Image: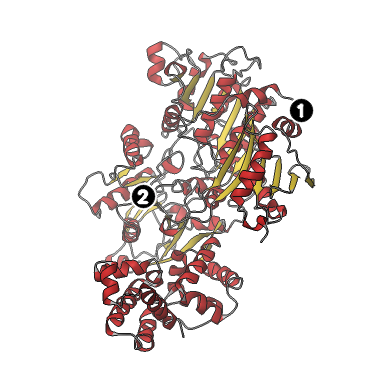
Amino acid sequence: MSPLHTETEADTRAERIDPILAAAGWGVVEGSRIRREVICPGRIQIGGKRAAPLSCDYVLFYRGQKLATLEAKKASLSHREGVGQAKDYATRLKARFAYASNGLEWREIDMVTGREADFTTPFPTPVELWERTFSAANVWRDRFGEVPFETDGGKWEPRYYQHNAINAALDAVAHDQRRILLTLATGTGKTSIAFQIAWKLFGARWNITREPTRRPRILFLADRNILADQAYNSFSAFSNDAVTRIDPGTIRKKGGVPRNASVFFTIFQTFMAGDGGPNFEGYEPDFFDFIIVDECHRGGAKDESEWRRILEYFEPATQLGLTATPKRKHNADTYGYFGEPVYTYALKDGIEDGFLTPFKVRQMASTIDEYVYTGDDEVLQGEIEIGDGFREDDFNTRIIIPEREKSRVEEFMRQIDPMQKTLVFCATQDHAAQVRDLINEMKPVSHAEYCCRVTANDGERGEAHLRTFQDNDKTIPTILTTSQKLSTGVDARNVRNIVLMRAVKSMIEFKQIVGRGTRVYDGKDFFTIYDFVKAYEHFQDPEWDGEPLEPVTPTSRPGGSEDEPGPDDPTGGGDDEGGEGPTEKVAIKLPDGKVRKIQYIASTSYWFQGKPVSAAEFMKMLFGDLASLVEDEDDLRGKWSDPETRDHFITALEEKGYDRDKLSEMKRLVDAPDSDVFDVLAYVRFSLEPKTRHERADAARSAGLTEHADQMRDFLETVLHAYERDGSQELSINKLGTFLTLKYGTTAEARAALGGDLGAIREAFVGVQRHLYRD
């Protein structure tokens, strides 16, 4: 055998590739380094599993920039085998060059020009790749590259998309772009990105004069205190005297706005307030060098917002907008002000990469989703005519039917785990109070604060409830009700349920609400949206999380559109609903007979291949993908009958997005709740009538146990009982040891009872499974 065929990839890398890179100066020249990078951990699946992670063999850094990716293959394989991976990694990491090598041959791909060619060593040096990547010199790019990330002693490392976003923003600054936009999904760490940008600007001594004579003054501007406070705490690496909060107390204490700091944090409302004029005028227009506008689609970028005055006043500053919402008609003015984003990372990317949690949508239709007054019901207040009809938008804004709300609360409280953290979105602040009280009437614990309301009117009390809810070590409050306030900016990682009890017209707001549950938390495989208001129809928009639509210039009232509450509402301070309207609401009492007839029908959508799909769509996709995995019915039986090939087959299904949980839920759809996952697959692909696990176990008892001695039959009966109860996961080869120790105490005692041969025991364990799936 050729020596090449005994050489592993690790050998090839260590003995062939590493020396060539070192000879070119990689990891040797100051400012250069080589890193094996885990690009993403892989999509989260049920049971704490993940899809396969993506890792690049070599990422070549120089001056803080990722210049190239290199995929290695062992010497016995063609170097061309790594080309596809190298290109994929370079695309994700925004590297200019991609390389593939087996240590003997080398191929280079220029991701900008598209040029591909084999080449012979020596490999390009860091300086050569830098000059080929950046043909035009830029002093500020070099200075930013010399400032390392602040990693908190190695505890923080930028994810690939965070690195991309930071570099894209700094590159825009280096090229004197004055208005910059970053669009990243909720939960992807926009505040960390903002901090690292500020850190590098500070370290490079960049400022408004474009001369490195002083450090910059940076303003972080948000539309609510909780966002400003979160950012202030996230910038803790700056010294205490470098950061300050601009708030009413500080202004009163100092007799004016604070000036002796480098990084300032405030909210629009504080800047607009002031006795002798707005507080922001306490600064000269060129006082701030750099302004970060958090959730910029909500505030000062709106054409008709009063807050726009602040950004226009500080016109000399470079301004960076952060948003989670791609361009839509409702936020066209945001994009008009800041321009197209220099970097975008979408919700579907975050879920597929495994940085965000996937979700299910439970669509809750009922017999009282709409209401027509027929004269049979009691009118408690207001005026109504026979024949007047009301749809979802009208409930709790024009008409109140307490029994309807109570039935909805009872329905979702039956379905959720009542001790999991839950957010409930209501139509108004009054509605949020009503739902809070209904939940507390049926709460499973005695604690008075089990469910709390957090709206604009709750003030500091509501903020305190929210802070406690965000603490993952605390279980009370467990449920929060709100109207608008919690749709953005709530960093609560362990939210497991989101309940929609008000219409959500705006795609922007819908995505923000979905983002409340996407943050990753240990043991959190998914979260569930309980949708009483048909918000799931947003998923039917092909652009719901794809490329942004070209916007239609909105004609909205000052402070926001009809669909998205604006930031200038006097009661909300930018984070909740304004007045409830002058018109008296109609209040209706339903008779007991009608209340008893309220019924709900639920169906589930699943996150699959980048979007939520219905159960029917899921089955169609499964039918197509099974064709690539099994040749015929016998092939499926053969793969499923052996625990080792079954595990490989299940892994192949999971990699395509069909995890065991989704397949198990398909049993209900094919009306086979007591069947095996095998029967779902056989039904979908070959239209075979499902059998129950009990029927399969009985068949195996009749045909598969007679050949064994009494003790072995007794052991295999234990296995079959576990299969009947819990399904095919009990038949994994990893379960064999568990069965033996549970039944006999130790492996030695099991061997003694069953004949002393572990190989024979294993064969019997596998053999009975062949009988399970014979027919």
Residue that extends furthest to the left in the rendered view of this protein: 446
Q: Nearer the viewer, residue 105 or 470?
A: 105
Whether residue 607 is visible, yes or no, is yes
Q: Nearer the viewer, residue 467 or 200?
A: 200
Q: Residue at x 57, y 43 (%)?
A: 37
Whether residue 593 is visible, yes or no, is no
Nearer-N-terminus badge (1/2): 1
* Mark 1 neighbour class, 10 Å CA radius: few under 14, some 14 to 19, many 20 or more: few
Amino acid at circle 2: Thr
Pointer 1: what residue?
136
Rendering coords of residue 454 (x, y %): 35, 40
Pointer 2: what residue?
422
Rendering coords of residue 743 (x, y %): 26, 71
Label 1 and label 2: CA atoms lie apart by 52 Å
Q: Nearer the viewer, mark 1 or mark 2?
A: 1
Q: Residue at x 67, y 46 (%)?
A: 550
Residue 323 sits in which quadrant? top right
Residue 129 sits in which quadrant? top right
Rendering coords of residue 305 (x, y %): 55, 31
Label 2 residue SS: strand
Residue 243 sits in which quadrant? top left
